[in-house]
Image (cartoon, grey):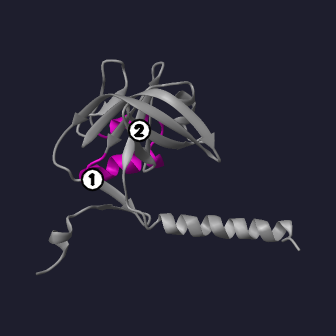
Amino acid sequence: MSASPDTRAEAGTALRDDMLMAMRRMARSVAVISCRHGERRYSMSVTAVDSLSADPPSLLICINRNASIYPPLDAGADFCINLLAADHRDIAVDCSGRLKGEERFTSGEWEDDVLGVPCLRDAQANLVCRQDGRFDYGTHAVFIGRLREVRLAGEVSPLVYVDGAYSTSAPLGAMCSA
């Protein structure tokens, strides 16, 4: 005897909700993806960034197809993964929706690389990528970026997102008492 469609849908919703609650427990560094399409710049805060391969040096980003940055990426725009520092919380919030469009670039100091990709000047790291593939899965598209430039700045002090809030990381030794 198989489950009714309603029972399967309820089970799928419960599984989705459980997955989202579990993912709240995964601390992730916060990045802002930025790109240019024509004369217009786009940016968006994300945590769905990861390294893909060291040979060739490449990363991947996962973008909801409803996001405003999706159309230029879908059109093949190169992009920058700007890894945010602990003091970049306002930039993360602005690029998460508090500000829209070009207004997002009023928060922080932005500059264009030699090919016009916008980069956050004081990000912990700028990983400038040439788009090198993509695939769709569910509500998202996964874009592969082949690194063409890496810039590093400042100390390692990432802005972290966990359990629905911004945080920082600290070495365990600093948190444990002797």
Q: Position of residue 46 (x, y in %)?
A: 44, 47
In the picture, measured across the screen, residue 8 lies left or right of residue 105, that is right
| Vertical comparison of 43 with 158: above or below | above
Instruction: Find residue 158 and name its label.
Output: 1
Q: Quadrant of residue 168?
A: bottom left
Q: In the orientation shown, which residue stands out farthest toward the bottom?
A: 178
- The relative height of residue 78 versus residue 11 in the rendered view (above or below) is above
The residue segment tinted magenta is 84-108
Label for residue 59? 2
Q: Which is closer to the viewer, label 1 or label 2?
A: 2
**In the current view of this chain or complex, which residue is farthest to the front?**
55
* Nearer to me, 51 or 42: 51
Q: Secondary structure at mark 1?
A: loop
Q: Residue furthest right?
A: 1
In the image, what residue occupies the spot 53% across and 69% down? 21
Picture coordinates of residue 43 (x, y %)?
A: 43, 37
Q: Quadrant of residue 26?
A: bottom left
